[in-house]
Image (cartoon, rainbow, N blue to C red):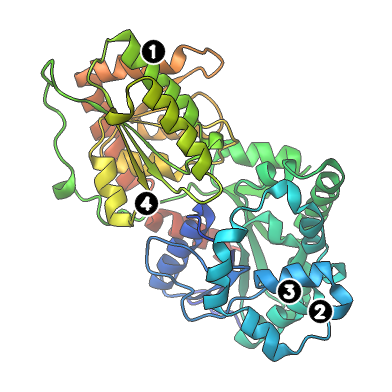
Amino acid sequence: MRHINKSSLKIIQLTPGAGEMYCGNCLRDNALTSHWNRLGHDVCMVPLYLPLTLDEPDQSENVPVFFGGINVFMSHKVPRLWHFVPKKIRRWLDSRKLLKTIGRKVSKTNPAEVGALTVSMLKGETGSQQRELQELSDWIKEQKPDVISLSNALLLGMNNHLQKATGAKTVCFLTGEDSFLDSLPKTHRSQAWHLVRKHIKQIDLLIAPSRYYAEFMSERLELPTERIRIVYNGINTEGFDESTVPDKGHCPSDNAQLVLGFFARMCAAKGLDILVDAFIEIRRRGKVPNLQLKIGGNMNSWNEDWVEILKLKLKTKSLLQDVRFHPNVSRTEKIQFLQSLDVFSVPAVCNEPFGFYVIEALAAGVPVVLPMKFAFPELIEKSGGGMLYLPENPHALVEALETLLADESKRRDMKFAGRKNALEFFSVSRAAKESMDLIMGLF
């Protein structure tokens, strides 16, 4: 039996790339990898499918991409033919330069179109990607890991093979798998959920980012709640230091322009259209006559036309000149964007296991307004940095925003409470330590 040095574990972190999109799981895994290494462990982050798109230094920069998107697709479409393609050609198809080139197109793929491929990946050793799995397994085995960490449950198909090949303990983070799986065609959906439930029983440690999602997934996965441990996600707090936060605590004059902001993926799932409608209604009602709207976050080619429709709606209301769009900004630009806001809101309609954007807004000193569902009530309870509204009430968001925008004292109180708790509790250093404590508890 191999001796385990608990003070310096060898860990392989497997993380799927998401094409041109900034992916919350990618950002989380990248930050955890960096901080686990700072804690004295030897952690290697391995990208799958596509190179990672990040706004911080890439911890996987010098690591090969495995399960490259082209090879995975061709192995699924023409498995017998692709089995005989020489390794040299396959590795060329996995090159970062080529995969980055196709990343923009891949990001447009609708989950409903990849049901069969998802099922194949979840079948693991019996799926169409046996050769890709063996190549990854051979490489990981050479690293002699103590732990293999899976970014999400969609990677569970490879777990059994990797456990047998390496003898390593396996960890799986749970974040947003349900939304993807539920979007698959009915036949593939039921198969995929069945395979996830089957494989997840072999995982040594399951980690969810909120109490809400742990309880939600324990039911969907048919697991006892105690099988899923909770570690709240954390952000890199660098750049959110006190000296960079403007003081918005002054009482605005009647002519002051308050700024409402949104920063998330620009899509219907995050409720951008709902916030635009709320902004239009607030301006129509006239209680906050000079309100401005700033919209930032990831916008890919898939959503460009949809965003243009929102711009046209604003133009027809003669409000487009009071709205600013900031797509695909850098980390520094993101922090500056957040710090320019008075109130922040993402009225998401998709199931949110956490919401990194909430914590980033709070760390920037901006109070938030969120729907009373998903993990949001937990974040508000733990931070004290915002207020909730009932999404079933069509007027609730407008009224909540108007109330907070009109109450400078409440905004100031929420600003300081939310910022303090975001920087102290919702930091990646805390998340890294808590998750590593759970991992070391496996030995």
Q: Which residue is mark 3?
A: 162
Q: Nearer the viewer, residue 412 or 342?
A: 342
- Asked whether the residues under the numbered discs 1 and 4 touch, taking CB atoms below 8 Å apart as contact, a structural biologist would say no
First in residue order: circle 4 vs circle 3: 3
Comparing labels 3 and 1, the label whose residue is closer to the camera: 1
Say what secondary structure mark 1 lies in. Answer: helix
Q: Find disc 1 in the rendering and name its residue.
A: 399
Neighbours of disc 2 within 10 Å: few (<14), some (14-19), many (20+): some
Q: Which mark is first along the chain, 1 or 3?
A: 3
Amino acid type of the residue that numbered disc 2 sits on in the rendered structure:
Trp
Nearer to me, 340 or 74: 74
Q: Quadrant of the C terminus?
A: bottom right
Label 2 to label 4, Cα distance in Å?
45 Å
Image vertical order of residue 237 relative to residue 266, above or below: below
The dot on residue 46 is: none
Residue displayed at 65% across by 37% down: 215
Point out which mark residue 427 bears: 4
